[in-house]
């Protein structure tokens, strides 16, 4: 342990070790508190991710079903014509911070409507497919945000757990050991000093 090896001898060194141990123990306590909060938040985000994934898969299956019906009724040309003139969707992500971790909190999706000059869907199935695709795209954006949030907070859970383990299993025990050795050295030095004083007093008599 580099910090213990560089600690000066005597009471000054013991005070430094005591301070380092106090700081390490307080730091471990705070990190464990942070870890509990992060774990709870991570579990909440995982549940939100699972719900968003189910919603996206259901809506995607619905959109694909309507699109297949439209394709069978009108052919590929009808599908291509139904998509002409519609611009790309615009996505806005709102970010939040949980225990120092920045992650997506919500998404806002703007899906452009069909321009007045564009031809409408050739059949009812394609009209349903268009509406279902809009819902599926929105659900996909929400799922992506939920998954990213869960991954970011999960990574911080792992990092914080590693730091707590390093403190509890390595750094704090080494500081305690160094402090114990310092206490023994001080006791021995005080004992030797007392012996020298007694010998010096006897010699004066």
Image (spheres, rainbow, N blue to C red):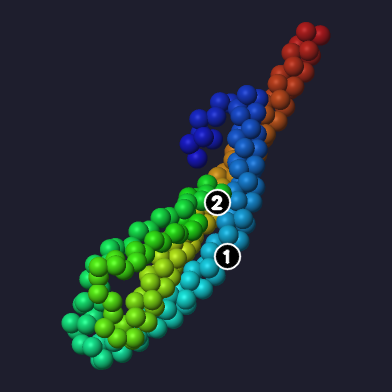
Instruction: Find numbered disc 1 in the image and state the secondary structure of the residue it sits on.
Output: helix
Vertical comparison of 130 with 193: above or below: below
**Where is residue 35 drawn, in percent x and y?**
59, 54
Q: In the rendered image, which quarter contains the C terminus?
A: top right
Q: List the single residue furthest toward the top.
A: 204
Mark yes or no: residue 173 visible.
no
Looking at the rendering, which quadrant does residue 125 occupy? bottom left
Which of 190/53 is in front? Answer: 53
Looking at the rendering, which quadrant does residue 66 occupy? bottom left
Q: Which residue is mark 2?
A: 98
197 left or right of 114?
right
Q: List the single residue furthest toward the right.
A: 205
Q: Earlier in the sequence, mark 1 or mark 2?
A: 1
Q: Residues within 10 Å of mark 1 (few under 14, many from 20)?
A: few
**Where is residue 49 drawn, in percent x and y?**
49, 69
Vertical comparison of 106 with 18: above or below: below
Residue at x 39%, y 78% (from the top left corner):
132
Which of 170/40 is in front? Answer: 40
Residue at x 38%, y 72% (from the top left corner):
134
Q: Which residue is mark 1?
A: 44
Residue at x 31%, y 89% (from the top left corner):
69
Residue at x 43%, y 70% (from the top left corner):
139
Which of 185/65 is in front? Answer: 65
Vertical comparison of 102 with 182: above or below: below
């Amino acid at each position: 342990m580099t910090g213990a090896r560089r600690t000066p001898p005597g009471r000054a060194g013991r005070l430094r070790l005591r301070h380092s141990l106090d700081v390490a123990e307080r730091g471990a306590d705070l990190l464990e508190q942070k870890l509990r909060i992060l774990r709870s938040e991570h579990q909440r985000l995982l549940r939100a991710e699972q719900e968003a994934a189910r919603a996206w898969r259901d809506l995607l299956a619905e959109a694909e079903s309507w699109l297949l019906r439209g394709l069978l009724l009108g052919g590929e040309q009808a599908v291509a014509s139904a998509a002409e003139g519609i611009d790309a969707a615009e996505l806005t992500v709102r970010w939040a911070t949980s225990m120092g971790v920045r992650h997506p909190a919500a998404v806002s999706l703007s899906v452009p409507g069909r321009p007045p000059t564009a031809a409408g869907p050739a059949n009812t199935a394609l009209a349903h497919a268009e509406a279902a695709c809009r819902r599926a795209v929105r659900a996909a954006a929400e799922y992506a945000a939920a998954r990213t949030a869960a991954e970011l907070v999960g990574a911080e859970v792992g990092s914080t757990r590693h730091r707590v383990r390093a403190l509890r299993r390595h750094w704090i025990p080494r500081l305690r050991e160094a402090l114990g050795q310092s206490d023994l050295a001080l006791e021995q030095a005080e004992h030797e000093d007392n012996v020298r004083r007694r010998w010096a007093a006897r010699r004066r008599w």
